[in-house]
Image: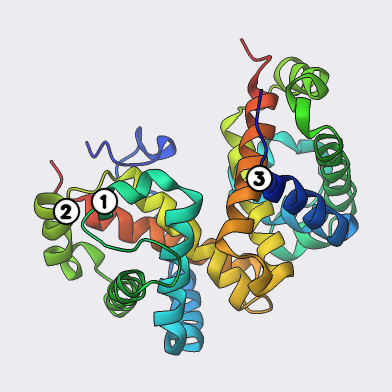
Amino acid sequence: MNFNLCPLETWVPRLTMSLSAKDKETVKTFWAKISSSGDAIGADALSRMLVVYPQTKTYFSHWKDLSPGSAPVLKHGATVMGGVGEAVAKIDDLSAGLLSLSELHAFTLRVDPSNFKVLSHNILVVLALMFPTDFTPEVHVAMDKFLAAVARALSEKYR
Amino acid sequence: MVKWTDFERATIQDIFSKIDYDVVGPAALSRCLIVYPWTQRYFGGFGNLYNAAAITSNPKVAAHGKVVLAGLEKAVKNMDDIKTTYKDLSVLHSEKLQVDPDNFNLLADCLTIVVASQMGAAFTPHVHAAFQKFLDVVVASLRKQYY
């Protein structure tokens, strides 16, 4: 049993809340619109996560400057969204596609999986403020499901 | 007792003075029902919630979204004692409505996203932090009377 699932999934195997064909289409279409802003999205999402959820700063004690828009935040925001882009490309098999990232998060970074939800929420907030007309409720639910699926794939190797 | 900085206090008053309750309330509630469909369990009497379009155009959802925002306004007007202000609302949600309090966070997240889409770049990290703190206090106050 994968105990990193949200409460609704614990009593049904992890095939529940998986991405439908429509979800994948919605994600790919929306991503095509926004991917050129990937770096900016990542930077804003990370910046605000560190301010709004200060417990996340504990993972970045090695950075000189954690303030919004600082050099390490900009660089890492771009790295994170690069990963999200990779996940979009491998949306049909996230477990296999994100294997090395999963191992990185499990064995090296060891980020508590609850933080994936926190960062996902901040990404969604940035998408809403940057793309208010495109980020409809339908796109919102597809992206939320997608980011949750990415988080599950990243948590796979944890134990 | 929750301590608010001058910035937080001013930010919350500013946000709520600027947003259109009649737009934001319905948008946040309908988004919650669409993005987290299990929340529909509390709205059996609302008629057609079959898909996103039905939810967005449902007049009962819209009316109730306004009720929710009116409730939030009470907290905005009583920021120094939201806990006491919400005592009856907390009892209502726990004993009569029997809402799982984890759902409060889901609606709060949807509200954040709707406000963010309205404010755009003005929803800076620090404004966002103040808003999140306000919602955390509101949710904690609504949970307070559950036993």
Q: Is residue B31 visible?
A: yes
Amino acid of disc 1: Tyr
Q: Secondary structure at mark 2?
A: helix
Closer to the camera in the image, B12 or A13:
B12
Q: State the image coordinates of residue B68 (x, y, percent, origin top left).
A: 82, 41
The reply to whether callout 2 and callout 1 are in contact (CB within 8 Å) is yes
Q: Which residue is mark 2?
A: A109
Asked if badge 1 and badge 3 are on a common chain, one would say no
Left or right, A30 with reference to A63: right
* C-alpha separation, residue under disc 2 versus residue under disc 1: 8 Å
Which is nearer the N-term, disc 2 or disc 1? 1
**Residue A43 figure quarter:** bottom left
- Above-or-below relation of A148 to A140: above
Q: Nearer the viewer, mark 2 or mark 1?
A: 1
Residue A103 horizontal/vertical position (percent): 11, 57
| Dot 3: element | helix
Amino acid on which the number 3 mark rests in the picture: Leu
Which label number is shown at residue A59? 1
Nearer the observer, A64 or A22? A64
The chain letter under disc 3 is B
The nearer-to-camera label among 1 and 3 is 1
Q: Chain of mark 2?
A: A
Residue at 58% across, 51% down: B129
**What is the chain identity of the residue bearing mark 1?**
A
Residue at 29% across, 41% down: A4
* Disc 1 from disc 3: Cα separation: 28 Å
Q: Which mark is residue B107?
A: 3
* Kind of residue sitting beneath label 2: Leu
Figure colour scheme: rainbow
